[in-house]
Image (cartoon, grey):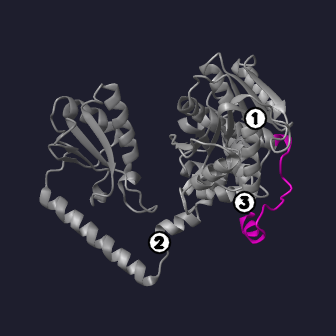
Amino acid sequence: MEPFRFHLFVCTQQKPEGVVSCPASGSFAVLDALDRQIQAGGLDGDCQLTTCGCMGLCDEGPVMVVYPAGVWYRRVQASDVGEIVDAHLRQGRAVGRLAWNDASAMKAMAVEHREKFRAAMTARDKAGTLPDHLDQMIRGYMPSRCILTALELDIFTAVGDGATAEQAGTRIHANARAVGMLLNALVALGLLSKSGDTYRNTPASSRFFVQGSKDNHRNGLLHIANIWHRWSTLTDSVRSGTRIPIGRDETPEWTTDFIAAMDRHAKERAPSVVKALGTAGVHRILDLGGGSGAYSIAFARASSDVHCDILDVSEVVPLTTEYVKQAGVSAQVKVRAGDMLTDDLGSGYDIVMLNAICHMFSEEENRELFRRARQALALKGRLVVQDFILNRDKTGPLHAALFSLNMLVSTDSGADYSEVEYTQWMKDAGFTDICRINLPGPSDLIVGR
């Protein structure tokens, strides 16, 4: 059975640096070029493009195979893609200069590769060598720290349309030698390019990391740089059972970065939340700890009948007010300062939302918050919790398990919780019809009426 006229496989098997592989020879560039040209040529309906693991022909990479005819191509470069699309995918004619038709030689190479790989793995195992995937996890902080430092120093803005290490160093008031080392590492990570002594942004870094660009994420990502310092206290936090003061917390700049980071995630997820809950019969919403107001803004835009109240701490309220003003929904979304754990929440709401809030609190605090939320709801009103929800034994999903540690180092008693826990807390607070609504991405909804 062939659902598509053509099925293309491109090897993208990553291997240790310095080892011959298709990605090292440019297979990701080939994959990107194929995807773009297939779309541009209106061939999506005829072609399925798939990545695959090692085919054992690494010395001849990048390698790709086109089915149903089973044509193998070797040493394919992005510059060859136009010819492959035109000749093979449009005209059904293989590109002879790239096709590899020597089946016996191909099999011999693949078998030799397989045997060498198995021998190498056996030798490493006997020697007690740390497996590559463990070594990579342990060293995973290095690229992260490199990028975070570049964001903190605003390196990508300093590089601009092109700069030497000396010029960039002058712009950010940093040592030219050290800046050059950082810039070289960013080139190795694929976030800068280098020609002679001049560095330039790549399309990705120019789009996402340069101040003034339409899709700039730098301000929000600075929150990740702030979190870095907290994670360095993880060992002591595990010993003590709570966060360790580090003397860098919650300055005005920290709060601004935090809300920008939350807004980046919330704006992406808000339409899914609105769609999942609907606006029929919804007139009043209480958005607890609403931050940038992204969820309230999304509901207001979805229906002119919806009015939202956002309750957040006094330091955040001016930021929230500005986000709401810029969104043009100030008539429907009001912001007030308060403590959701102690201050009056009001009453008569159709929905009370807790978006990425519960992980900041202890079990006891969440139980009390659910009870208070029930009192603020109208008859048949809904409490909506959106969070990273752990499985029953709390060993996954991975993102939720790691984020729970983030709460350990960042809060007095916060954590991620399981669906079982949220459901029980809602039942104990008097909610019924409790259900989980799965959303795209790492967080889901627990809803009680």
Count of marks overlaid on the render = 3
Q: Which residue is denoted by mark 2 in the rendering?
A: 131
Determine if residue 241 is in view. yes
**Residue 242 within the magenta-colored segment of the rendering:** yes
Between disc 3 and disc 1, the foreground one is 1
At x 59%, y 24%, the residue is: 279
- First-in-chain label (2 vs 3): 2
Q: Quadrant of the C terminus?
A: top right
Left or right? Give the position of 266 relative to 204: right
Between disc 1 and disc 2, the foreground one is 1
Q: Where is residue 402, by image quadrant?
A: bottom right
Cα distance between the residues tagged 2 and 3 = 29 Å
Mark carried by residue 376 = 1
Amino acid identity at mark 2: Pro
Mark 3, Cα crowd under 10 Å, few <14 / some 14-19 / many 20+, is many
Q: Position of residue 394 (x, y in %)?
A: 58, 61
Between disc 2 and disc 3, the foreground one is 3
Amino acid identity at mark 3: Leu
Mark 1, Cα crowd under 10 Å, few <14 / some 14-19 / many 20+, is many
Tag 3–tag 1 contact (CB < 8 Å): no
The span picked out in magenta is 231-253
Amino acid identity at mark 1: Ala
User: Relative to residue 339, is residue 214 depicted above or below?
Assistant: above
Q: Secondary structure at mark 2?
A: loop
User: Relative to residue 41, is residue 66 depicted above or below?
Assistant: below
Q: Which residue is denoted by mark 3 in the rendering?
A: 408
At x 60%, y 53%, the residue is: 185
Along the viewing direction, whichever of 396 and 9 lies nearer the viewer:
396
At x 72%, y 56%, the residue is: 363
**Residue 344 within the magenta-colored segment of the rendering:** no
